[in-house]
Image: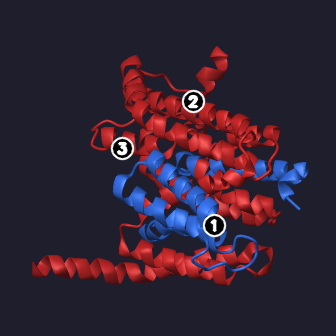
Chain colours: A blue, B red
Amino acid sequence: MNATHDVAYVLVAIAGLTIVTIVTRSSFFMLPARINLPERVERALRYAPACALTAIVVPKIFVPNGELFVSVQNNQMWAVLAAAAVFAKTRNMMVMMAVGMAVFTVLRLYA
Amino acid sequence: MTKLRETLVPPLDPAGWREGLRSMVTPGIAIAAWGVVTGVAMVKVGMSVPLALLMTIVVFAGSAQLAVLPLLVSGAPLPIVWVTALLVNVRFVIFAAAMRTYFSQLPWKQRLFAGYINGDVGFALFLMRFGGAPERGTTFQWGYFFGNASVNWASWQVASIVGILLGGLAPTEWGLELAAVLALVAVVVPMLNRVPVLAGVVVTAVLSVATIHIPLKLGLVISVLAGVIAAVVVAPAHVNKSADAKRAA
C-alpha cells in the first residue's frame, strides 16, 4: 500500500505543510518587536534540522523494507557513504550525486 | 495584477533589484539541480503528477518536502508529517529573527509574503551584504531581497516541475529514489562541523533505527528530541573547552 495514492490524505498533508512553511519563514516578520527568541531556545533550535534530517535518512538506508539491514551488501549504504565523503571534500552537489548514483549502480549490477 | 503586486511587494530600488538578481545566478544553478532531484523523487515514490506539482508549487521547501516523502508513502499520521517538516524548517525561524529589522517597517501582508519566499541562500546573501548596514529597511535592500528571491523561486519551480514531468520516464531499477536520500545528505554534511551537532546526529541516528517499530512514527520525534538534548548537553562543555584552549595558547 502506498499512501501517496490516497488523494485526500496527500491534499490535507500539503495544506498543513504549506502552513508550516509560512509559519516558520514568516514567524518573526509578523511578531511584535518586543518578542525575541531567548538565546537558549535559539541554540537548541539550531540543532533540530540536522537531527530531523538524520532521523529520516538513516532509517531509509538501514531499514529499507521494515527490516534492519546493516550489512556489507547494503548498496545504498555504500552509495551514501561515498557520496557524503565526496561532498565533504568538494561541496559540489552534482559531483556527489553522480558518485552516489554510480556507486549504487555498479554495486547493483556487479556485486 | 499591479494591485496584487503593490499589496504584496514593497517599493523596490531597480539597482538593488539588479544586484540581487545577479548575485543569485550561480546559486540558482545549484538550486535548480536540487529542484530536479526533488521533483524526480516525488514521482518516483509514487505520487501522482498533479499532486506532486501542487506540492512543490505551494509548499516551496525542498528539504522539508524530501524529508516527509517516506512518511507520506507509509501513510504516517499527519501530525507526524507536519512536525517533521516543522523540525526541518525551524532554521527559518532563526533566519526570520535575524532579518526582521529590515522588514518591520512594512505592512503585514508584505512582511508575510517576504517571509514566505525567503530561502536559505537568500538569507545568507542578504546578511552578508547588509549585515553591517547602518540603515535598515531601505528600498535598495528590499530590491536586493526580491531580486534574490525571484531567481531562487523561478529556478526552484521550473527545475522541480521538469523533474516531476521527466521523473516518471526513468525505470525504477535505476534507484532514483536514492537521489532524494543523497540530496538530504548534502544538506546534513556541511552542518557536521561542530561537536554538539555531531553528538546530536549520532544519538538521533542510533535511536531512529532502534525506535523504528514504535507505532505512529513516534520514534522519529523521540529520536530527534533526544538528539537535540544531547547536542545541548554537549554544547556548553565543548564551548568552554575550546575557550580554555584559547586561553592556554
**Which corner quadrant of the image does residue A68 belong to?**
bottom right
| Spot occupied by residue B166 in the image (x, y as percentages of width and height) | 70, 36
Residue highlighted by disc 1: A56
Q: Foreground: A107 or B2?
A: A107
As drawn, A93 above or below B207:
above
Measured Cα–Cα span from mark 2 to mark 3: 21 Å
Between disc 2 and disc 1, the foreground one is 1
At x 60% / y 71%, what residue is drawn?
A58
Say what amino acid the circle numbered 1 marks.
Ile
Give the position of the C terminus of chain B as an image quadrant.
Answer: bottom left
Between disc 1 and disc 3, the foreground one is 1
The chain identifier of the residue carrying mark 3 reads: B
Relative to residue B102, is residue B237 drawn left or right?
left
Relative to residue B36, is residue B190 drawn left or right?
left
Mark 3 falls on what kind of element? Answer: helix
Measured Cα–Cα span from mark 2 to mark 1: 28 Å
At x 38% / y 60%, what residue is drawn?
A88
Residue highlighted by disc 2: B154
As drawn, A37 above or below A16:
below
Q: Residue furthest left?
A: B249
Say what amino acid the circle numbered 2 marks.
Ala
The chain identifier of the residue carrying mark 1 reads: A
The chain identifier of the residue carrying mark 2 reads: B
| Spot occupied by residue B145 in the image (x, y as percentages of width and height) | 45, 33
Residue highlighted by disc 3: B127
**Which corner quadrant of the image does residue B196 belong to?**
bottom left
As drawn, B3 above or below B92:
above
Q: Are marks 2 and 3 on the same chain?
A: yes
| Spot occupied by residue B74 in the image (x, y as percentages of width and height) | 80, 64
Look at the image and tell me whether residue A103 can be seen: yes
